[in-house]
Image: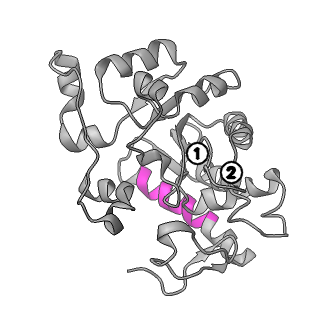
Amino acid sequence: MLSKEPVAPSSSPLSGNLKNFFNPPRALTVEEIEELITRFGNFERIAKKAGFSGVQIHAAHGYLINQFLSPNHNQRSDEWGGSLENRMRFLVRVYQEIRKQVGEQFPIGIKLNSADFQRGGFTEEESMKVAQKISELGGDLIEISGGSYENPKMLVSEVRESTKKREAYFLEYAVKVRKLTTTPLVVTGGFRSLDGMTHALTDGGIDMVGVGKPFAIVPDLPNRVFQGSFTNITLKPIRTGNRSIDKSAAMLELGWG
C-alpha cells in the first residue's frame, strides 16, 4: 500500500507523467535518515542469513538513494545535501552499514545511474566520481543504468542508430568508468543478441551483461546461450493506439514485461 505521505530527501514532488500518481513527499528528518541506514544493514544481514550469496544496493532509477544523489530532488542544506560529497553521504553510509553487518567477504554490488537525464539532476561527471568512491570503499560490483521513472532512459524503445548497433544503452559511459576503476562493471539495458552481448564483453570494457526484458520472453536464456541455441530476440514497442496511454509507453512496457 502506498503511503499517503511519502518521504524523500526533500519535499520535492515528482515531475512528468508520474506527478499525479504520488502525493508530494515530506523531507526526512536526520533521525529518520539514520534509522533508514540501520534498516538497510539489518535487511541485508537477514538476506545473508536466509541464504543469499550477495546483495545489491539500488542507487538508480529515481529510488531513494538516487534521490539523495540528485540535486534536483535533494535540496537539503545540512550534511546530507548540497555538495556531491554531502549528497553521496547517504549511499556511502548505507554501504558502510551493510558491510559492517554482513562482513568483509559477502559481496555487495551497487546499481548506479550513469545520469538522471533531467535538468538539474545527477550528472555523468558526478556519477563517475561516485563510482570511484564506491570502488575505494571496496564495492564488489557496479551495475550501470540510467534515467528514472520521470525520464525512463532504462526503458527506452527509440534509440540512436549508433546505440542500436552496439545494443547497450550505457556502454559508452562504462568505457569511461573502466578507466577510473578496476571494480567489476555490469551494463544493463538494450541487449537483444548474443553478438551484442559478446561484443560488449570483449570490446566494451565490462565484465558482465545485465538483461531484463529478454528474460521475460526467454526465461531460460542463459541455458540457450550455453547450448548455442540463442542468437537474438526482437521486441517491438508496445502501443495501444490510445494516445494518452501511449504517452507513458515505457511504463506500459515495464508492466507488460
* Whole-percent x, y for residue 257 in the image: 25, 51
* Whole-percent x, y for residue 88 in the image: 73, 53
Element at badge 2?
Answer: loop
Indicate whether residue 78 is drawn in magenta.
no
Q: Residues within 10 Å of mark 2 (few under 14, many from 20)?
A: many
Q: How is the image coloured?
A: one colour
Q: Are marks 2 and 1 in contact (CB under 8 Å)?
A: yes
Mark 2: which amino acid? Phe
Point out the stretch of residues depicted in magenta.
37-48
**Which residue: 54% across, 38% down?**
144
Furthest residue in direction top, as rendered: 202
**Which residue: 31% across, 30% down?**
192
Q: Measured along the vertical axis of the image, is residue 202 above or below residue 59?
A: above
Q: Measured along the vertical axis of the image, is residue 18 above or below residue 131?
A: below
Q: Measured along the vertical axis of the image, is residue 100 above or below residue 233?
A: below
Q: Residues within 10 Å of mark 1 (few under 14, many from 20)?
A: many
* Whole-percent x, y for residue 25 in the image: 60, 79
Element at badge 1?
Answer: strand
Mark 1 = which residue?
113
Q: Quadrant of the N terminus?
A: bottom left
Helix, strand or loop for the magenta stretch, by majority: helix
Mark 2 = which residue?
122
**Which residue: 53% across, 67% down?**
16
* Whole-percent x, y for residue 173 in the image: 60, 30
Q: Nearer the viewer, residue 243 or 228?
A: 243
Which badge, 2 or 1, is on the more N-terminal residue? 1
Quadrant of residue 218 within the rendered picture: top left
Quadrant of residue 114 within the rendered picture: top right
The answer for how far apart the CA atoms under marks 2 and 1 are is: 8 Å
Mark 1: which amino acid? Asn
Furthest residue in direction bottom, as rendered: 4
